[in-house]
Image: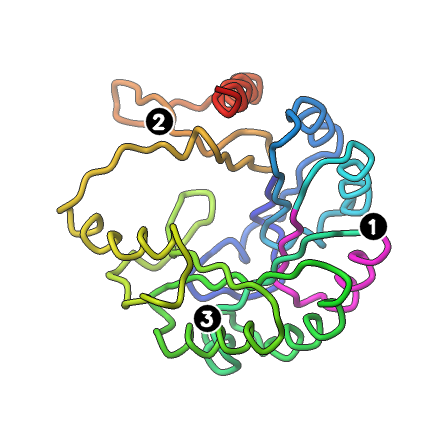
């Protein structure tokens, strides 16, 4: 569940910090969550979820229904994050970190690395914490190594992802070949990274199976599932109802 326009940082590779903030209505969120089958894990992400005016109610709804979820944050609102994690009984937290102090500021536009250290040290004995490192054109393998060392020293897990430029994130930097990350990312991500450059260069074709296990829901309630093109080559706009039907099919796939 995402509010990609809720931001607190001037991220170098995205324009969404300069757009109007959009937040998913609590009523729409509840209607979606009511239909989420047991066993489906929910990620609360953004932008910055803490900027959502109903974030406490959202987390309370998830807890009330015993839904498994992860709260993702860019950790800039450190005091509020620590307070919400404790007050709402958050069990799993992931923090964004694209490199050590200097690289972090270069990528994120703010000097916020110390907040990561503080939050991890304050909460690591209370909640399962992960660090999300996104391999992108603005960081290096050395940055990844340093972030992994930090994770190892604090006993938190490292999740390595790859920069992408979907339309809903308003990204401004083109995808480029990745540096080697062998031995730094866990399976199956390490295998994906190894094949990424071949795919980017057009030398590898893969079917998309991600719809069977993952779906991104935007603030309006629509999904990131590709739309059918019309005769002009433009994607048709789907209604929220149509996207919810897509979600039902995705959830059915999970049971097969």
Residue in the picture at 81% in, 47% down: 56
Q: CA distance from mark 3 to mark 2?
A: 31 Å
In the orientation shown, which residue stands out farthest toward the right? 87
Q: How is the image coloured?
A: rainbow
Question: In the figure, 68 relative to 169: above or below?
Answer: above
The location of residue 106, given as percent across then percent down, is 46, 76
Q: Nearer the viewer, mark 1 or mark 2?
A: 1
Q: Are marks 3 and 1 in contact (CB under 8 Å)?
A: no
Residue 235 is tagged as 2
- Element marked by disc 2: loop
Q: Are marks 1 and 2 in contact (CB under 8 Å)?
A: no
Q: Earlier in the sequence, mark 3 or mark 1?
A: 1
The location of residue 111, given as percent across then percent down, is 58, 78
How packed mark 2 is, by other alpha carbons closer than 10 Å (few <14, some 14-19, many 20 or more), is few
Q: Nearer the viewer, mark 3 or mark 2?
A: 3
The location of residue 81, given as percent across then percent down, is 75, 61
Residue in the picture at 55% in, 51% down: 19
Q: Which residue is mark 1?
A: 88
Q: Which residues are magenta?
A: 70-87
Is 163 placed left or right of 56 in the picture?
left
- Element marked by disc 1: loop
Quadrant holding the N terminus: top right
How packed mark 1 is, by other alpha carbons closer than 10 Å (few <14, some 14-19, many 20 or more), is some
Residue 55 is tagged as none
Q: CA distance from mark 3 to mark 1?
A: 30 Å
Q: Earlier in the sequence, mark 1 or mark 2?
A: 1
Residue in the picture at 78% in, 57% down: 85
Choose between 67 and 231: the one closer to the eye.
67
Q: Which residue is mark 3?
A: 107
Choose between 86 and 182: the one closer to the eye.
182
Q: Earlier in the sequence, mark 3 or mark 2?
A: 3
């Amino acid at each position: 569940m995402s509010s990609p326009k809720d931001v607190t940082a001037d991220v170098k590779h995205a324009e969404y910090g300069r757009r109007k903030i959009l937040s998913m209505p609590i009523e729409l969120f509840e209607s979606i969550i009511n239909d989420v089958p047991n066993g489906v894990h929910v990620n609360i992400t953004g932008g910055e979820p803490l900027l959502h005016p109903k974030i406490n109610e959202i987390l309370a709804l998830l807890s009330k229904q015993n839904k498994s979820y992860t709260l993702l944050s860019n950790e800039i609102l450190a005091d509020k994050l620590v307070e919400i994690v404790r007050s709402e009984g958050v069990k799993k937290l992931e923090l964004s970190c694209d490199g050590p102090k200097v690289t972090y500021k270069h990528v994120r536009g703010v000097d916020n690395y110390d907040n990561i250290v503080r939050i991890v040290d304050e909460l690591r004995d209370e909640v399962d914490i992960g660090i999300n490192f996104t391999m992108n054109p603005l960081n290096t393998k050395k940055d990844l190594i340093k972030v992994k060392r930090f994770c190892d020293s604090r006993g938190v897990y490292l999740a390595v992802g790859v920069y992408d430029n979907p339309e809903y994130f308003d990204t401004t930097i083109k995808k480029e070949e990745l540096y080697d990350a062998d031995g730094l990312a866990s399976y199956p991500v390490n295998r994906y990274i190894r094949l990424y450059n071949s795919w980017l260069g057009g030398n590898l074709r893969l079917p998309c199976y991600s719809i069977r296990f993952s779906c991104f829901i935007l603030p309006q309630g629509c999904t990131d599932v590709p739309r059918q093109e019309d005769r002009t080559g433009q994607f048709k706009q789907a209604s929220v109802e149509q996207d919810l039907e897509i979600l039902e099919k995705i959830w059915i796939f999970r049971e097969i």
